[in-house]
Amino acid sequence: MEIKEIIREENKVYSTPQLLDEVDMHYCPGCSHGVVHKLVAEVIHEMGLTEKTVGVSPVGCAVFAYNYIDVDWVEAAHGRAPAVATAVKRLWPDDVVFTYQGDGDMAAIGTAESIHAANRGENIVMIFVNNAIYGMTGGQMAPTTLIGQKTATTPYGRRVDLNGHPLEITELMKILDGTCYVTRQSVHTPAAVRKTKAALKKAFENQLAKKGTSVVEIVSTCNSGWKMSPEKANDWMVENMFEKYPLGDLKNI
């Protein structure tokens, strides 16, 4: 006889977001992308935007985001997500359009597209996952890699005289006239997850209100690229990345 467990609504702690497809994720254990995907899926569903949302994902660890979040997706060449999102939003202005970009994508090969889309005030949401390394291609130095941080291409640590300073692209986004909301969050604790979800919701609300470009940076871990356990990667992020990339709203119009 089949026994069905009935969970009363008041006892439910968590349920899978309806927009998350029931497939195994390819992300490494401890990766922040899975949590961010969950939050994006929850916000879109709870705001009733499922049928009118288009995501744009370029090359990087999140290139297969379309496998996980059940909305319409467009794949873009590396760094070109804001340009593609601009086209989608202008062609279908009633749709909600967001990009999902890593630090190598937004702050390196896609710097021009990202800055100019934001400067024009394109009415889109940019979700920027910053783990300070190229995770997908082998752990090379990224524009956001910290001074002294060891990577596959800076085995003795990043040096200013050789590699330059870390690029604070979110601070650059803040000073552009086209941005209405620029924030930096994380997902390393339950409280941080709640703040990030609220930030994502506000960004989508801004788009519905036609305020311009919203940028949500999420400071994240890459325990595989950093050669650490998930727990130690979280600790390292708090102790090192938050000093350079402090959490909170940078701009809120």
Image (cartoon, helix red, strand yellow):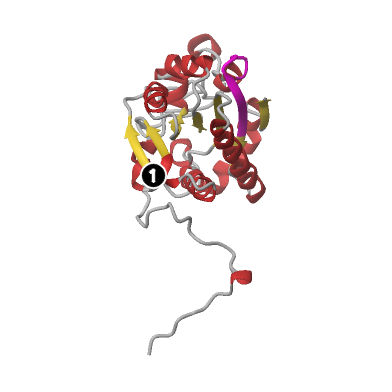
Q: Which residue is mark 1?
A: 71
The reply to whether residue 142 is visible in this rendering is no
Query: Does residue 75 belong to the magenta stretch?
Result: no
Where residue 62 sits, quadrant-wise, is: top left
* Foreground pick, 207 / 223: 207
Q: Residue at x 53, y 9 (%)?
A: 161
Specify whether 136 is left or right of 219.
left
Residue 68 or 158: which is nearer the viewer?
68
Q: Is residue 66 left or right of residue 171?
A: left
Residue type for callout 1: Val
Quarter occupied by residue 109: top left
Please report the residue visible at 67 percent of the width from the left and 48 percent of the height from the top: 191
Name of the residue lying farthest toward the top: 161
> Quadrant location of residue 99?
top left
Q: Is residue 176 a member of the stretch shown in magenta?
A: yes
Start-end of magenta stretch: 174-184
- Which residue occupies 55% across, 13% down? 160
